[in-house]
Each structure stands twice: as C-alpha cells, then as structure tokens.
Image (cartoon, helix red, strand yellow):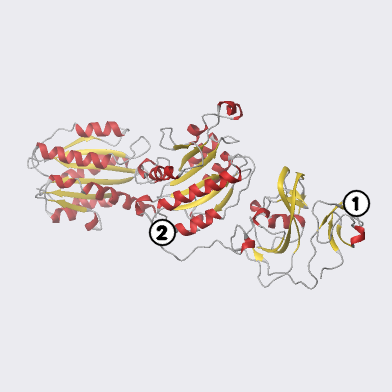
Amino acid sequence: MWASWIPVLCLGGYARLSPPLCPRTERGGSWSQPSRCPLSAGVCLLLPPEPVGSEGAVPIPITCSTRGLDIRKEKADVLCPGGCPLEEFSVFGHIVYASVSSICGAAVHRGVIGHSGGPVRIYSLPGRENYSSVVANGIQSQTLSRWSASFTVTKGKSGTQEATGQAVSTTHPATGKRLKKTPEKKTGNKDCKADIAFLIDGSFNIGQRRFNLQKNFVGKVALMLGIGTEGPHVGLVQASEHPKIEFYLKNFTSAKDVLFAIKEVAFRGGNSNTGKALKHTAQKFFTADTGARKGIPKVVVVFIDGWPSDDIEEAGIVAREFDVNVFIVSVAKPIPEELGMVQDVAFVDKAVCRNNGFFSYHMPNWFGTTKYVKPLVQKLCTHEQMMCSKTCYNSVNIAFLIDGSSSVGESNFRLMLEFVSNIAKTFEISDIGAKIAAVQFTYDQRTEFSFTDYSTKENVLAVIRNISYMSGGTATGDAISFTVRNVFGPVRDSPNKNFLVIVTDGQSYDDVRGPAAAAHDAGITIFSVGVAWAPLDDLKDMASKPKESHAFFTREFTGLEPIVSDVIRGICRDFLESQQ
C-alpha cells in the first residue's frame, strides 16, 4: 500500500502534497509534470513515493568521481566517501544536475552531505537545457547548455556501511559489480615491457554505438599485449568535455581484470577535447603512486574519431617534456566538406613524438577492426623506437673494444664487426639518445670513433663496416684503461648509463683484472665476449657481476651471432636495475 502523500522537492524546501493539490500528477511520480510549490514560489520536482514501512536498501559505496549516469535506477541509496579532493567533483547545474556530474560533488554542492561524506539518495530525472552555474558549499558548479539525463539528491538513509576515503570503485554501482584487483599473478609478456594509457574518445563525435566498438577494439589490443606483472601494464582515460581517468596502471595486472574494467566504462559525451585529455594524462597518469615503473617506456595511445575539438599540438609538446610516447590512432578522417571545421589538419603529425610514420596509425572505421590489432601491438612492443621515453635503447653509451690481433684474421675480423653492428643497430642513436664508440686494440690502441663523432645510426653502421684490420699482439688490460680514459672520460657527466663490450679471441699478455676493476669503479658495466682461445678466467675477471650473465664464450666466430640478443637483453636488464 502506498502512502497517501507525494514528496515534492521545491526550491525553498520540501512539502507533502496530497493528490488533490497535484491534480495533473499520478501517484507514483511523473517527472514531466511540474506543480506549483505551496511553500515558496518556484517549480517543484515530484519524487517517487516509497512503500509504507520501507527501510530502504543498504547504501552502495561509490567513489568521489562516480557520476549520475553510472547509476541505472530511478532511485538509489549510495554512500559517498569522505576526504574527496575538489578536483574530482565535476558538477553541472544546481538542484537539478546533469547526469555527467559527480554524485558526491552534487551532494556536497547541494548541502546534503559535508566533505566527510555520508549517505545520499539519488533520483534520476530527464534531460533538460541550461544547467546553471552556482557556487555553493565551496564548489563551483558549471553551466551546460543541454544534457540527455539529470538527477537530484537528497539526504540518504544510514546503512550498516561507513564512508571511507577508499570506497570500492564501480562504474555501475546499482548492478553490484565491483572493479577490484584480483590476486592472480601472471608475469605477462616480458619482451613487451611498457606502461600504456589508452586515451579513448568519449565525445559526441563518436556516439554511443561507435564508443562500444572502440572499447571492443581496445580490449582486443590489451589482450594481445600480454598484460602481466613483468609485462605491459595498462590504464584507461576517457576524453570528452573533461578528461576522466577510468583506471590506473596499478589497478590491474591481468588481462581478465582489464577487459572487465574496459567493458564497464560508461560513455560520457561532450566535445572531443583530446588535447586537454592528452595533457592531463601526460602530467597526472604516469607517477609512481599510480603504478608507473622506472626505466619502462611511457606510452599514450590516443584514439580520435574524426578530429579533436581543441589544440593537440601543445599537448604533444607537454607529453614529450614528460618523456611520454604519443601514438595517434585516427579513425574516419574528416572528408573534404568537413575540413573547414578542423582547427589543424596536420594534428596527427604535431601530436606524435616524431613524425616518421611509426607513431601514427589509421583505421577507416570501427567495423572489422580485428585485422588492425596485431600491427598496433607490434608497434607498442617495439621499444627501441620509443624515442620520447628514457629507455635502455636511447639512454646508454656503449663502447666496443675490438680485438685486432694477428690470431683473429681478416675474415673473422669481419664477423666481429658484424657482431658489433648487430648490437649497435638495435639502439636509438641520436644526438640526444644512445651513443656508440669503438676502439680496436692489439699491443696498441686506436679509437675508430668516439661517442660524439656520429649522431645517426646510418653513419655509425657505415663507419663500423669500414674499420680496417690492424693485426698485432694482444694487450687487453692496456686497451681497457685507454678506453676508460679517452672514450668514457669526455662523457663522464652524461646522463646515459655506460657500457663496454669487449670482444677478444685470445689471452691477454698483460693484466686485465686491475683495469677492469677501475672501469667498474668508474660506473662502467663490462660485457666480455670470448672466441676460440680466449681464457674463461680472463673473461670472468673483466666482466661485471654477476659474472655468469656478463661473460660469454663461443668456440667459433660464427657463434657470435646468437650472443647478440644476450648482450642486448643484458644491457637493458642492467639499465632497468640502475633506474630502480
């Protein structure tokens, strides 16, 4: 049996109106029929009645940024946490709030709760025009010309749960589903270590249907990446009128949890302010507190359906300043008739880290996108081209100390140079990136080229190919001392980490232990690679610790090729450890 009165929320307070005073309103509530408030002038909002004697459900914990559109019931009791930062309160309107508004922010703005949180009852309302901007209780709400749904809030009923600053995060609290990190511990794809933020388009440009197709595509990419504790970590940001970080890198380390979190993301709408969202992501997303790892490439994959509504060039500059690699995935480029509405037709080239084609990707539409998943994943896992992040591929100085003694021979010397080239070409050589140097030694030493001589990969590889064979004795200890003094000495203040790769085929006529120890003390990590008659003891004496992962040996010069990947992995491993 329903109560015989209908609660009415008026601008001046509450009133209980019996049905005769609301002749146009059916008992049970109708959101479209306003009634004149008997207590004060203004329009009243009819709230749905409750059954007599109903105590209501236990309030559902929500987060500071949970929005009205995340609640899919006409009426719900929720529990707001305390201590919410004001920047998480995005509020549009007054008394009647656009459903894109934060529920807790609206409740504080309305005076229903204080900043310590508490129970709130939310009522869904239809959309409207001209949401007003009002300062109330320390919160400045914003104007909005139109929105498709609204809500209002009243004081909620206390339940058995208490508000805390760590409320359970859920996109749709009314369903009872909660996004939480599971105890599953998968290592993931170790060859694809990257911290990736998917910046998806949540604007009116894309619309609800294509938004869901976009989420499906992002889910497929996330699944193929091989997410895990020692592999890639991902988070998600939605770009619309105002950016919203849906989940951080630290929240999930399994593909299953990430896929569920992506599925639960709700469409926001608004303008496609991609530049604003990219800048926010570069500045706020990649921190130690949110799960960013030192020495791991930072990547933002930006999805743009059509074109951005704001300036994306400045955001690209900010991203580069924060060592973030920006990938632009553009879908449905503007047609000629639409170009007049685009602020900058070259927005893709101006946003990416480097305009070389690697950082941009285009799909004609959101249908049949499965074939585009693998090529995009391959790009995201190609760390040596991540030029905007400080990684082992662009933040190292590598000197090669090459044995030119008579026992090597001309043809084998060429195989040694090929070994050196195969390592060198893996790294991103530039004036601000990785640096390569080479020294050839017999009893004497000859600097083939220093760290500052060449700043492009093409030039370095060309010089290596043209190194002439010296022939002579073997004095490896003197060669190490020479290299530390003359090659590493001039770059002692470089921010790059220093590595020395020694390639030799025989026993040294002088002591190697002392010079190698001095190099270690100078912060130089040594990898020793021996061929044929090179004594294992010498290799271990020269190598950095742990010896077993820094000393290599092969009987034949043709056996150098498999060692290339071992040395590269070792350099990257040592670089990452140095960043911890």
The quarter of the picture where the N terminus appears is: bottom right
Q: CA distance from mark 2 to mark 1?
A: 60 Å
Asked if residue 522 shows in the view, the reply is no
Give the crowd class for mark 1: few <14, some 14-19, many >=20 residues within 10 Å.
few
- Element at label 1: loop
Q: Which residue is more in the foreground, 462 or 447?
A: 462
Would you say 484 lies left or right of 375 here?
left
- Element at label 2: loop
Q: Which residue is more in the foreground, 206 or 136?
A: 206
Residue on which the image places disc 2: 229
Marks 2 and 1 close (CB-CB < 8 Å): no
Residue 140, x across and y down, in percent:
73, 48
Asked if residue 354 shows in the view, the reply is yes
Residue 465, x across and y down, in percent:
20, 33
Q: Disc number at residue 30?
A: none
Which amino acid type is shown beneath numbered disc 2?
Thr
Residue on which the image places disc 1: 41
Give the crowd class for mark 2: few <14, some 14-19, many >=20 residues within 10 Å.
some
Residue 51, x across and y down, in percent:
79, 69
Residue 84 found in image quarter = bottom right
Which amino acid type is shown beneath numbered disc 1?
Ala
Residue 438, x across and y down, in percent:
22, 38
